[in-house]
Amino acid sequence: MSFRVASSPHQRTQRSTGDLMRLVCYCAVPGFAAQIWFFGWGTLVQFCIAAAVALVTEIAILELRKRDFERAVADCSALLTALLLALCLPPLAPWWVTAIGAFFAIAVVKQLYGGLGFNLFNPAMAAYVMLLVSFPVAMTAWLPPQSLTMQDYSLWDALSVIFTGFTTEGYSLEQLRATADGFTMATPLDSVKTALGRGITFDEAIAKPAFEGEAGIGWFWVNMAYLAGGLVLLKAKAINWHIPVSMLAAIGLCAGALHLSSADTFASVWFHLFSGGTMLGAFFIATDPVSACTTNKGRLIYGALIGLWVVIIRTWGGYPDAIAFAVVIMNMAVPLLDYYTRPRVYGHRSKGR
């Protein structure tokens, strides 16, 4: 009888880094398709721009570092970063915003730290935070669902708006953002946050045509699509359950406690879970194997604190959605969490730290 000895970590599957990255991309396709269905072709164009810039940047930097860029590009990590960034951007954001974000994610957040496996922050979320702080107007220009808009736009219109600022028929982005009643619509998170800040009750804030089942037209189904893709990732054991479950549970508990204390001034649990990028963040962003915790206990704490930060920032912060900020904040805490939650080595006594 022969035995095969190998160093840790020991895995039951033979899935390579490229296989894992591609699987995550495939599982994000339902949510990607839902965003295109409800908000138009802009997200597809943003992904193409982000992917091109990310791949070129990765190749150029690795060539300068005298590294094997073919193997690095083949692992699809840059493609996944571009996809996650594109999914978080407004569909018709200017092309240069996407290009700057993709370059920053790969060149600064990833390669400056040494490449894949060495980055402290999630590249897509760090780039998103940088863009949101630097270009707040462009980064908050989300479109209403196409069923509510005055002007429909095609793939060619999306290309034209992204690169020139106007559709092929001469409509501007602000005109495309106007709903059928002539008002410019914000995202459900932004709309409710603004209304609550003005003293309007939560029930009054969601009593608008743009809201459907509290989450907002389109956003519920987008989140359900990402939830379905996330469950496939769990089934395939591509991610661990600890982070998404603890994050969603923390959001539910915190939002539920606030809503029970004052239903008029705090949003409901359903609204927090199915508006914005909650499911995308829980299953596809927070579970990044490089920038997240490596121990199971650490993952539970990590996910729960992300959920706590999401509710805090959405309720009292200056930005309507908080997934990116919460993830970046907790990325900084990962080394500390791993240090205090690592399992005791067999045969050694635990020491006070």
Image (cartoon, grey):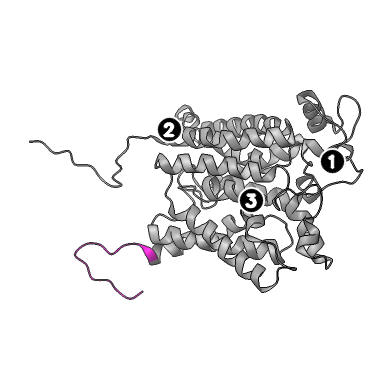
Name the secondary structure under disc 2: helix
Tell me if I can see residue 66 in this picture.
no
**313 over 95 or under it: above or below:** below
Mark 1 lies on residue: 177
Rendering coords of residue 127 (x, y %): 64, 47
74 sits to left or right of 153: left
Q: Is residue 346 magenta?
A: yes
Rendering coords of residue 21 (x, y %): 48, 36
Dot placed on the residue nearer the N-terminal end, 1 or 2: 2
Name the secondary structure under disc 1: helix
Category of crowding for the residue at label 2, using alpha-carbon neighbours closer than 10 angstroms: few (below 14), some (14–19), many (at least 20): some
Dot placed on the residue nearer the N-terminal end, 3 or 1: 1
* Front position among marks 3 and 1: 3
Q: Which mark is residue 19?
A: 2
* Front position among marks 1 and 2: 1
**258 over 165 or under it: above or below:** below
